[in-house]
Amino acid sequence: MRRATAIEADGRRPWHEALEHGAVRDLWVHATTWPELLAEPGRAVGAPDGRAGDSSQRLRELEVAAAGRERLLTRWLNELLYRAQAEWWIPVDFADVRAIDGAVRARVRGVRPSEPTGALTTAALERVEVDDVPGGLEARIVLKT
C-alpha cells in the first residue's frame, strides 16, 4: 500500500497516523524537519483517545541523547512513554524542539489525565525506521500493547 508523504498530506504541518493490529500499534509519523518528526510521536502519545486532563501542568525541559536517527527517536519516544505511564504526565505541547549532534532537547507541556493511561509500552530499536521522503521525513514505529 502506498503511503502519502508529508508534502502530499499537508504541505507543511507534521502529522501522524496510528494503525491497530491486535496487540500491535503501527505509528506512522510525517514531518518536513527532524525536530518536527521528533515532536509528532509525542503528540500521538498525548492524544491516543482524546482523554481530558488537568492542563495546568507547567513546562518541563526534557533531553535525551543517542547516536543515529532511529536510536534517538526510540530513546525520545520511550522517555515520553515512561513519563506517561509512571508519572501520569501526558505530553501535549512541544516548544523549542532542538535536535543536534545526537541529542534532542525540548520544552514540553503536559497534562495529568483524569484516568490512568492504560497499557503503554516501549518502542524497540529494531522496530523503528526513519526515511527521507520527498519534502521531508517519515518514520514508522511499531509498539506492542
Image (tube, rainbow, N blue to C red):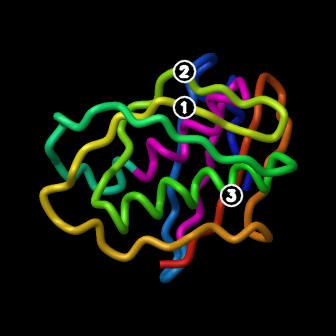
The residue that mark 1 highlights is 106
Residue 61, x across and y down, in percent: 48, 35
Q: Amino acid at mark 1?
A: Ala
Q: Position of residue 124 (x, y in %)?
A: 69, 71
Give how far across and how far down residue 60 sits, in percent. 40, 36
Q: Quadrant of residue 36?
A: top right
Q: CA distance from mark 3 to mark 1?
A: 16 Å
Q: Residue at x 65, y 47 (%)?
A: 64
Evaluate if marks 3 and 1 touch, with contact meaning CB atoms under 8 Å apart.
Answer: no
**The magenta stretch spans which residues?**
25-45
Q: What is the three-letter code of the residue carrying label 2?
A: Asp
User: From mark 3 to mark 2, how far is it between C-alphas?
Assistant: 20 Å
Crowding around mark 2 (Cα neighbors within 10 Å: few <14, some 14 to 19, many 20+) is few
Q: Quarter-wise, where is residue 13 in the image? A: top right
Please state if 111 lies on the left or on the right of 73 as rendered.
left
Q: Residue at x 14, y 43 (%)?
A: 54
Q: Is residue 106 left or right of residue 104?
A: left
Q: Which residue is mark 2?
A: 96
Considering every residue shown, the one lying at the far bottom of the view is: 23
N-terminal-most mark, 3 or 2: 3
- Which residue position is annotated with label 3? 74
Looking at the image, tell me whether mark 3 or mark 1 is earlier in sequence order: 3
